[in-house]
Image (spheres, rainbow, N blue to C red):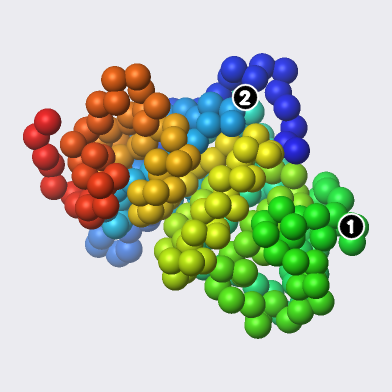
Amino acid sequence: MGISSDHPDDPIFEVNHLSLQYPGGRDHPPVQILNDVSFSVRRGGALTLVGPSGSGKSSVLRCLNRLLEPTSGIIRFDGRDVRSFDPRELRCRVALVMQTAVMFEGTVRDNLCIRPSNARGDFSEGRLTAALDEVGLESKLLGRDAATLSGGEKQRVTIARALLRDPEALLLDEPTSALDPPNTFLVVETILQLRATHALSIVAVTHQPDLVRRLGGNLLYLIKGRVEAFQSLDAADGTLDRRLEAFLAGEKITGSKTRT
């Protein structure tokens, strides 16, 4: 279970005027990736980032756990500027699950035990077994070569590895896009169950409307690094930007504007 705050109503993430530039090469100007992005995520809540390819969604995730350092703006996690954290501590508390599961050489047990030096957490055999059980995998997989797992099994091992660090937030970067429908279903069910049992806050990039609907919370719509819409899926009146309605209906989001 994640660390509880003395102020449970405070946002777990507060992002204010976040901008990110990549340096330009010779005779080329800097490339603007994110431009004045602001949002917050409540504790135990969910935020889904949507928008066309190249809109900066994955860059936002990587700024939240300091895999990228923004050019300007402030990001607070648990009330603190993320720059005040040791990056290793921050990445244990804010775990990133990427699009393609990363498996290291060795067994599933070896993969679960990979962690930064001095990382907190229980890595006993009983806890490893329990972590696999939480993601719907059998303990007999602990001794199996990780390279022989299916795509869905690898992704669930990745989530179990994150859980062993006792995170308070999960960052999900297209966690099901490389999976077939049956494995997509299993990973989505795993994420939803863990959110409930661990009171995890979730920030997700996904093109799976079903996952978005079931997570609830807020939608942040980005185009070319700018916020186009920030709306609640839980609003009483149920009204959404028409582009977000189209996304939830399974249509592909593009950069074009639609009148509302």
Is 164 placed left or right of 12 in the picture? Answer: right
Quadrant housing the C terminus:
top left
User: Looking at the image, which residue is at 73% across and 36% down?
Assistant: 2
The vertical placement of 8 against 229, above or below, is above
Disc number at residue 126?
1
Q: Amino acid at mark 2?
A: Gly
The residue closer to the viewer here, 134 or 221, is: 134
In x, y percent, where is residue 232? 37, 28
Is residue 79 left or right of 222 when viewed as pictured? Answer: right
Numbered disc 1: secondary structure? helix
**Residue at image x 20%, y 41%?**
243
- Taking the view exactly as shown, the residue that stands out farthest to the left is 259
- Alpha carbon distance from label 2 to label 1: 34 Å
Amino acid at pointer 1: Gly
Are there few (<14), some (14-19), or many (20+) residues within 10 Å of tag 1? few
- Residue 129 place in picture, x, y as percent: 82, 60
Query: Could you tell me how many numbered marks the image carries?
Result: 2
- Dot 2: element: loop
Task: Tell me, yes or no, if residue 159 can be seen here.
Answer: yes
Q: Nearer the viewer, residue 176 or 105?
A: 176
The tag earlier along the polypeptide, 2 or 1, is 2
Q: Residues within 10 Å of mark 2 (few under 14, many from 20)?
A: some
What residue sits right under mark 2 in the picture? 79
Which residue lies at the image location 22% right of the left edge and 33% below the top edge? 241
Q: Nearer the viewer, residue 193 or 5?
A: 193
Q: Residue 5: where, in percent of width, then height? A: 71, 23
Q: Quadrant of the N terminus?
A: top right
